[in-house]
Image (cartoon, coloured by chain):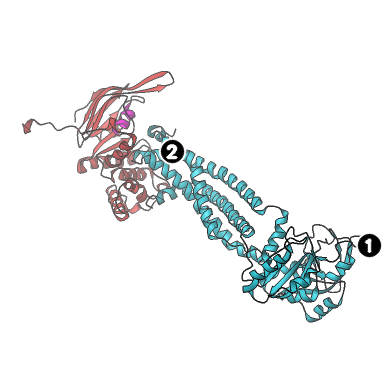
Amino acid sequence: MAANHVPAPLVAVRGVSKVYRRGRQRVEVLHHVELDIPQGDFLALMGPSGSGKSTLLNMVAGLDLPTDGSISVAGRRIDRMSAAELARWRASHVGFVFQFYNLMPALSARKNVELPLLLTRLPAARRRRHAAIALALVGLQDRAGHKPGELSGGQQQRVAIARAIVSDPTLIVCDEPTGDLDRHSAEEVLGLLQRLNRQHGKTIIMVTHDPKAAEFARRILHLDKGTLVEQSPP
Amino acid sequence: MKFLPLLLAGLLRKKTRTLLTLLSVAAAFALFGMLDAVRVAFNAPQTVTGIDRMVVASRFSIIQPLPYSALNRIQAVPGVRSVTYANWFGGVYQDPKNFFPNIAVEPASYLQMYPEIVLPRDQRRAFLGTRTGAIVGASLARRFGWKVGDKIPLQATIFPRAQGDNLWVFDLVGIFHASVPELKGVEQQMLFRYDYFDEGRQFGHGTVGWYIVRVDDPAHADRVAKAIDRMYANSADETKTESEREFQLSFAKQIGDIGLIVSAIMGAVFFTLLLLTGNTMAQSIRERIPELGVLKTIGFSNRAVLLLVLGESVLLLVLGGLGGLLLARVTLPVLGAATSGQLALAMATRSWWLGLGLMVLIGLFVGLPPALRAMRLSIVDALAGH
């Protein structure tokens, strides 16, 4: 029996549709999407603008709710959670990396990394220690006191990655993480994400336009007009 | 406490704007601190207990004179050590804007009653011996460049002369100083002789503006005050015996309800402050919508974001407000000294608490609209900067 046991996917997307209304117009962004993401996967979501890849990412990360269908992460139905439950769930289960880094400009790198930990009961000393470890993991331990404006784009994105991993989330979601970076910085960031996936077992979902960026993932999934059109096996 | 760096980060995002807003808040609360101290000084209940000098004036109005005949009766009240009297003249020197207190007094008893008026011996003798003589405080003499020997013409505004004109001429025979710096305000006064004034005026002969009484023991002040007022109860000249300070305040209150004036000014100041800080907070939150979206993304609940924005608004008001109140705290003793100690201007504990309450209240009030907006932000829209 045990040999036939197939582990449940970390993320299970079942028949998910998303419809927006613009005035009287009904826009279906996602159409009955079915997707499994196993633990330890590094998935690249690709597709043209408006294909629904960011919408799918937002829903898997608990930022938005599907109009129809269900989304389970680690066995929990996040589409049934209230706004407050989702906020708590995101705080402990999801790390986010954005295209434009979205760091707090007046806070140092360390304080930015500490932000998710403010929602925990960790004492200040342990928050500082966790932030220092996360910054060391992204190679920026010597820049902890610098503010975002004093760092390059690549360094800022690495701080954002440190912020995403500091609370040891179940899932890391990245929306165009290299969209604002030069090729060299982009490769550094992608290499870092790959290392987090391969060496630390982090499950990563990344939306990207860039085929070269997608090559760093374990598998690539294409969306077009709200439907999965192509999937390379994990 | 752990969210404090986040609140400060919000405020420090636009340093110049925050600094200017803080200065505006500080200015408003400095004004509040000073005006509230004035209001408290004017409205504080006064008692004669423990003081040795009191003023006896008409119970109905300080412009209502008392009969000169009261002098002996007051002097006879047990516990009264000495009595003198004075009359407000209200004269103007050259121009109505040259206002200063000018008072008709009985020279010998008045100078004895007010040892803080320090006059050189020869000038004192000249004052006692010259019917048209007048003495002025050193500050007043400096203000108009007067020196002993000058003739000082005053235009009467209340008391015309018996001859029908309003021009009273006095011989300046002395210039006095205050014995202590706290009473420097007395140097703004001009004193001249009551007998010259009473004989020369067209009406009101045989009356005085008020009596000043010194008691033999401050512990008896209350009893003496009640005895004097009882003596004139139900007469045409009912009296009110009170502390000198309260008497001075009654004088100032003639211009209107000080409490109402002060409250109206503070109301206008805080209304302006509401508009200013409200606009600053709204603008600040508008610019930070993506940042608020990020906070929500990483797990800050809607309620937490609401509280963060409210906290930031309250922090802005409290930082600026405390700065303003501290400024008022430092400035008030200087202003108080300028009134010769007649107005005890100091920040009362109540003013600190009232100020703090106002800071929190205004902070919550101006922070609420942007906080509600921040709370209702959809994460997806916020991240897109909408």
Seen at 46% across and 47% down, the residue is B312
Query: On screen, B251 above or below B177?
Result: above
What is the three-letter code of the residue carrying label 2?
Ala
Q: Secondary structure at mark 1?
A: loop
Seen at 80% across and 74% down, the residue is B107
> Can residue A65 be found in the magenta stretch?
yes
Looking at the picture, tell me which residue is in the foreground, B192 or B270.
B192
Q: Colour of chain B?
A: cyan
Query: In the image as oriented, which residue stretches furthest toward the front?
Result: B234
The region drawn magenta spans A52-67
Query: On screen, A93 above or below B135?
Result: above
Instruction: Look at the numbered discs 2 and 1 and tell me whether their residues touch, using CB distance below 8 Å.
Output: no
Looking at the picture, tell me which residue is in the foreground, A141 or A33.
A33
Q: Secondary structure at mark 2?
A: helix
- Between the residue at mark 2 and the residue at mark 1, the CA separation in whole angstroms equals 79 Å
Q: Where does label 2 land, which residue? A: B374
